[in-house]
Image (cartoon, grey):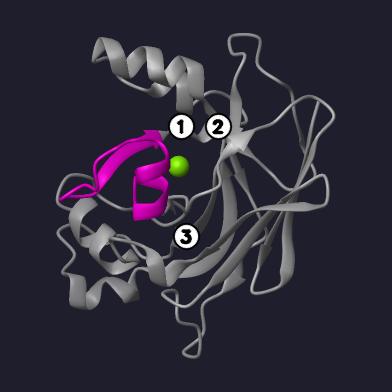
């Protein structure tokens, strides 16, 4: 399985990092070894001094497909949750300045925390999902999927031109404003529609 991530999918977050609002989705990937399952602790990586959280809505692919049209994209994902795209921001900046790929800043072990999934029912509207991230009990990110620049269906249509999507693949759909640092000893909790779906302790 693979984890496909969208960068800069909320205008307020692009702005806080001084990035332009993109014309096409900014895509990167994380390997399976990046997954941090619910209940697992994240060990602060030794290669960074600026580990940051990015809470994001995550959808899981439930049907294989390639060249998926936007109007059929909703047939290809069936589960939704909130995840955290952990980022070594200092390493990412360094890579960006050199024009180099981001993987060492974004795809390391434990960098993709994934909450408990909920089944998408006919009543679920993934463009109407409120989510929050709390750090040590204080709300640090308060997002809503309606503010995404590229919808889930648009993302799927775009990425499936390049990559076959397989059952079990996950898509991290981008983070809203409010990203910030985490330190050893911090506890992060992610909420979707008011329900806690993920808790991560940083060691
Ligand atoms: Mg992200």
Q: Label for residue 31?
A: 1
Ligand 1 occupies quarter: top left
Q: Can I make out residue 106 in this image?
A: yes
Q: Position of residue 27 (x, y in %)?
A: 29, 41
Q: Position of residue 99 (x, y in %)?
A: 23, 15
Q: Nearer the viewer, residue 7 or 67?
A: 7
Whether residue 33 sits left or right of residue 151 in the image: it is: right
**Placement of the N terminus among the 4 image quadrants:** top left
Per the image, the residue denoted by label 3 is 60
Mark 2: secondary structure: helix
Q: Earlier in the sequence, mark 3 or mark 1?
A: 1
Per the image, the residue denoted by label 2 is 34
Q: Earlier in the sequence, mark 3 or mark 2?
A: 2
Residue shown at 47% from the left, 21% from the top: 105
Other residues around mark 2 within 10 Å, as few (<14) / some (14–19) / many (≥20) = many
Label 3 and label 1: CA atoms lie apart by 15 Å
Q: Can I make out residue 5 in this image?
A: no
For residue 130, which quarter of the picture? bottom right
User: In the image, which residues are magenta?
Assistant: 1-29
Q: Label for residue 117?
A: none
Considering only vertical position in the picture, is 13 above or below 61?
A: above
Residue shown at 78% from the left, 52% from the top: 138
Does the magenta-highlighted stretch encompass residue 14? yes
Other residues around mark 1 within 10 Å, as few (<14) / some (14–19) / many (≥20) = some
């Amino acid at each position: 399985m693979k984890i496909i991530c969208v960068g800069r999918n909320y205008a307020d977050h692009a702005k806080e990092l001084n990035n332009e609002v993109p014309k096409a989705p900014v895509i990167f990937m994380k390997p399976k070894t990046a997954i941090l399952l619910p209940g697992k602790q994240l060990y602060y990586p030794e290669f960074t001094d600026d580990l940051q959280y990015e809470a994001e809505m995550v959808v899981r692919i439930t049907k294989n497909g390639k060249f998926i049209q936007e109007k059929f994209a909703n047939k290809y994902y069936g589960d939704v949750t909130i995840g955290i795209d952990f980022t070594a921001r200092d390493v990412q900046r360094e890579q960006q300045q050199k024009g180099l790929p981001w993987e060492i800043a974004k795809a390391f072990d434990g960098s993709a925390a994934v909450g408990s999934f909920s089944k998408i029912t006919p009543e679920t509207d993934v463009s109407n999902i409120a989510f929050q991230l709390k750090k040590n009990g204080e709300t640090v990110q308060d997002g809503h999927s309606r503010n995404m620049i590229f919808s889930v269906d648009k993302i799927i249509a775009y990425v499936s031109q390049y990559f076959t999507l397989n059952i079990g693949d996950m898509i991290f759909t981008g983070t809203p404003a409010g990203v910030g640092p985490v330190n050893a000893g911090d506890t992060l909790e992610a909420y979707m529609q008011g329900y806690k779906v993920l808790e991560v302790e940083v060691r």
